[in-house]
Amino acid sequence: MFSKYAVFSGRARRSEYWYFYLFTFLVSLVLGCIPFLGLLSFLWSLAIIIPSIAVSVRRFHDIGKSGWNYLFFAIPELLFFGYIFSFMFYAIKDLINAGINLSNFPDNTEAIGRIIGNSIIENGSLATLGIYFLILIVSIILWLVWFTRDSQPGENKWGPNPKEQPENTNNTY
Protein backbone atom coordinates (compact mmCIF):
# COMPACT_ATOMS: atom_id res chain seq x y z
CA MET A 1 0.00 0.00 0.00
CA PHE A 2 2.84 2.39 0.78
CA SER A 3 5.15 1.07 -1.94
CA LYS A 4 4.47 4.27 -3.92
CA TYR A 5 4.95 6.55 -0.89
CA ALA A 6 5.99 9.64 -2.86
CA VAL A 7 5.37 8.60 -6.48
CA PHE A 8 3.49 11.36 -8.28
CA SER A 9 3.84 9.93 -11.77
CA GLY A 10 1.71 7.25 -13.32
CA ARG A 11 -1.89 6.35 -12.69
CA ALA A 12 -3.88 4.98 -9.75
CA ARG A 13 -7.06 2.97 -10.17
CA ARG A 14 -10.16 3.72 -8.15
CA SER A 15 -9.54 0.69 -5.96
CA GLU A 16 -5.99 1.79 -5.12
CA TYR A 17 -7.22 5.27 -4.18
CA TRP A 18 -10.25 4.21 -2.12
CA TYR A 19 -8.51 1.32 -0.35
CA PHE A 20 -5.67 3.67 0.60
CA TYR A 21 -8.14 6.14 2.11
CA LEU A 22 -10.12 3.38 3.83
CA PHE A 23 -6.95 2.05 5.44
CA THR A 24 -5.70 5.47 6.53
CA PHE A 25 -9.17 6.41 7.83
CA LEU A 26 -9.43 3.24 9.92
CA VAL A 27 -5.94 3.70 11.38
CA SER A 28 -6.72 7.37 12.14
CA LEU A 29 -10.02 6.35 13.75
CA VAL A 30 -8.35 3.81 16.02
CA LEU A 31 -5.55 6.21 16.97
CA GLY A 32 -8.03 9.03 17.57
CA CYS A 33 -10.23 6.93 19.86
CA ILE A 34 -7.44 6.03 22.25
CA PRO A 35 -6.71 9.14 24.35
CA PHE A 36 -3.10 8.44 25.30
CA LEU A 37 -2.09 7.91 21.64
CA GLY A 38 -2.47 11.58 20.74
CA LEU A 39 1.18 12.01 19.76
CA LEU A 40 1.11 8.81 17.69
CA SER A 41 -2.07 10.03 15.96
CA PHE A 42 -0.36 13.34 15.14
CA LEU A 43 2.72 11.53 13.78
CA TRP A 44 0.48 9.25 11.69
CA SER A 45 -1.25 12.32 10.22
CA LEU A 46 2.11 13.80 9.28
CA ALA A 47 3.32 10.49 7.83
CA ILE A 48 0.37 10.14 5.42
CA ILE A 49 0.37 13.69 4.01
CA ILE A 50 2.75 12.95 1.13
CA PRO A 51 1.30 9.53 0.18
CA SER A 52 -2.26 10.88 0.24
CA ILE A 53 -1.32 13.73 -2.09
CA ALA A 54 0.62 11.30 -4.30
CA VAL A 55 -2.24 8.80 -4.64
CA SER A 56 -4.64 11.69 -5.35
CA VAL A 57 -2.38 13.05 -8.08
CA ARG A 58 -2.07 9.58 -9.63
CA ARG A 59 -5.87 9.22 -9.45
CA PHE A 60 -6.23 12.52 -11.33
CA HIS A 61 -3.84 11.16 -13.94
CA ASP A 62 -5.96 8.01 -14.24
CA ILE A 63 -9.07 10.02 -15.17
CA GLY A 64 -7.08 12.13 -17.64
CA LYS A 65 -6.61 15.27 -15.53
CA SER A 66 -3.51 17.07 -14.35
CA GLY A 67 -2.40 16.49 -10.77
CA TRP A 68 -2.53 20.26 -10.25
CA ASN A 69 -6.31 19.82 -9.96
CA TYR A 70 -5.54 18.72 -6.40
CA LEU A 71 -5.43 22.42 -5.56
CA PHE A 72 -9.21 22.59 -6.22
CA PHE A 73 -9.55 20.65 -2.98
CA ALA A 74 -6.58 21.81 -0.94
CA ILE A 75 -7.20 25.56 -1.26
CA PRO A 76 -10.87 25.54 -0.12
CA GLU A 77 -9.96 23.34 2.85
CA LEU A 78 -7.12 25.65 3.84
CA LEU A 79 -9.38 28.69 3.49
CA PHE A 80 -12.16 27.14 5.55
CA PHE A 81 -9.96 25.86 8.38
CA GLY A 82 -7.81 28.99 8.26
CA TYR A 83 -10.96 31.02 8.71
CA ILE A 84 -12.05 28.89 11.67
CA PHE A 85 -8.61 29.34 13.25
CA SER A 86 -8.63 33.11 12.71
CA PHE A 87 -12.18 33.35 14.07
CA MET A 88 -11.11 31.52 17.23
CA PHE A 89 -8.10 33.81 17.56
CA TYR A 90 -10.18 36.99 17.28
CA ALA A 91 -12.91 35.65 19.58
CA ILE A 92 -10.34 34.84 22.26
CA LYS A 93 -8.73 38.26 21.75
CA ASP A 94 -12.15 39.95 22.21
CA LEU A 95 -12.73 37.91 25.37
CA ILE A 96 -9.36 38.89 26.79
CA ASN A 97 -9.94 42.56 25.91
CA ALA A 98 -13.28 42.38 27.73
CA GLY A 99 -11.51 41.04 30.81
CA ILE A 100 -13.34 37.71 30.80
CA ASN A 101 -11.62 35.04 32.86
CA LEU A 102 -11.98 31.80 30.86
CA SER A 103 -11.08 29.68 33.88
CA ASN A 104 -14.47 30.61 35.39
CA PHE A 105 -16.38 29.52 32.30
CA PRO A 106 -19.68 28.49 33.98
CA ASP A 107 -19.88 31.88 35.69
CA ASN A 108 -19.16 33.79 32.47
CA THR A 109 -21.19 31.74 29.97
CA GLU A 110 -23.62 34.54 29.13
CA ALA A 111 -20.88 37.16 28.77
CA ILE A 112 -18.75 34.84 26.62
CA GLY A 113 -21.70 34.10 24.31
CA ARG A 114 -22.54 37.81 24.00
CA ILE A 115 -18.95 38.80 23.17
CA ILE A 116 -18.50 36.01 20.61
CA GLY A 117 -21.88 36.83 19.06
CA ASN A 118 -20.94 40.49 18.77
CA SER A 119 -17.58 39.53 17.26
CA ILE A 120 -19.36 37.49 14.58
CA ILE A 121 -21.80 40.30 13.74
CA GLU A 122 -19.21 43.12 13.80
CA ASN A 123 -16.68 41.38 11.61
CA GLY A 124 -19.17 40.04 9.06
CA SER A 125 -17.71 36.66 9.90
CA LEU A 126 -20.90 34.72 9.43
CA ALA A 127 -21.21 35.69 5.75
CA THR A 128 -17.56 34.87 5.15
CA LEU A 129 -17.94 31.52 6.86
CA GLY A 130 -21.00 30.79 4.69
CA ILE A 131 -19.08 31.57 1.51
CA TYR A 132 -16.12 29.42 2.56
CA PHE A 133 -18.48 26.61 3.56
CA LEU A 134 -20.24 26.78 0.19
CA ILE A 135 -16.90 26.61 -1.65
CA LEU A 136 -15.93 23.63 0.51
CA ILE A 137 -19.20 21.81 -0.28
CA VAL A 138 -18.79 22.42 -4.03
CA SER A 139 -15.22 21.10 -3.92
CA ILE A 140 -16.35 17.98 -2.03
CA ILE A 141 -19.06 17.28 -4.63
CA LEU A 142 -16.54 17.81 -7.45
CA TRP A 143 -14.08 15.50 -5.66
CA LEU A 144 -16.73 12.75 -5.39
CA VAL A 145 -17.68 13.09 -9.06
CA TRP A 146 -14.07 12.96 -10.24
CA PHE A 147 -12.75 10.24 -7.94
CA THR A 148 -15.63 7.84 -8.47
CA ARG A 149 -15.19 8.12 -12.24
CA ASP A 150 -13.81 5.12 -14.11
CA SER A 151 -10.30 5.14 -15.55
CA GLN A 152 -9.70 6.86 -18.86
CA PRO A 153 -9.50 4.00 -21.38
CA GLY A 154 -6.23 3.30 -23.11
CA GLU A 155 -2.99 5.12 -22.60
CA ASN A 156 -2.87 8.81 -21.76
CA LYS A 157 0.06 11.18 -21.28
CA TRP A 158 0.61 9.82 -17.74
CA GLY A 159 0.98 6.20 -18.79
CA PRO A 160 -0.95 3.07 -19.67
CA ASN A 161 -4.27 2.27 -18.07
CA PRO A 162 -3.55 0.12 -14.99
CA LYS A 163 -6.80 -1.80 -15.54
CA GLU A 164 -5.51 -2.99 -18.89
CA GLN A 165 -2.12 -4.11 -17.54
CA PRO A 166 -1.59 -7.80 -16.82
CA GLU A 167 -1.57 -8.59 -13.09
CA ASN A 168 1.74 -9.66 -11.58
CA THR A 169 1.07 -13.24 -10.53
CA ASN A 170 4.66 -14.03 -9.59
CA ASN A 171 4.33 -15.04 -5.93
CA THR A 172 7.97 -15.57 -5.08
CA TYR A 173 8.79 -15.00 -1.44
Image (spheres, rainbow, N blue to C red):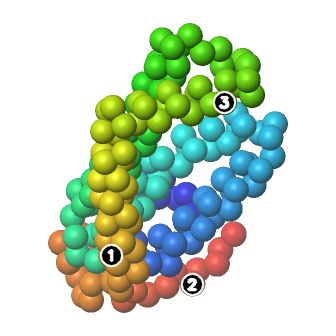
Q: Residues within 10 Å of mark 1 (few under 14, many from 20)?
A: some
**Mark 2 secondary-structure assignment:** loop
Indicate the position of residue 75 as horizontal and vertical percent values: 30, 48
Label number found at residue 169? 2
Q: Residue at x 81, y 46 (%)?
A: 34
Residue in view at x 66 percent, y 53 percent: 28
Q: Is residue 43 above or below residue 74?
A: above
Q: Which badge, 3 or 2, comes first in the chain's sequence?
A: 3
Q: CA distance from mark 3 to mark 2?
A: 64 Å
Residue 83: image x %, image y %? 38, 39
Disc ID at residue 109: 3
Q: Secondary structure at mark 1?
A: helix
Residue 108 figure quarter: top right
Q: Residue at x 33, y 32 (%)?
A: 122
Question: Which comes sooner in the sequence, label 1 or label 2?
Answer: 1
What's the amino acid at mark 1?
Trp
Q: Nearer the viewer, residue 106 or 58?
A: 106
Q: Amino acid at mark 3?
A: Thr
Query: Total label count?
Result: 3
| Residue 79 visible (yes or no) | no
Q: Mark 3 against mark 2, which lies toward the viewer?
A: 3
Q: Which residue is mark 1?
A: 146
Mark identifier at residue 129: none
**Nearest to viewer (mark 1 / mark 3):** 3
Report the Cα–Cα distance between label 1 and label 2.
30 Å
Badge 2: few (under 14), some or many (20 or more) residues near its Cα, within 10 Å?
A: few
Q: Quadrant of residue 26?
A: bottom right
Q: Examine the rendered structure and indicate whether residue 151 appears above or below residue 108.
A: below
Quadrant where the C terminus is found in the figure:
bottom right
Dot 1 or dot 3: first in sequence order is 3
Q: For the point 51% across and 14% down, which residue is it? A: 98
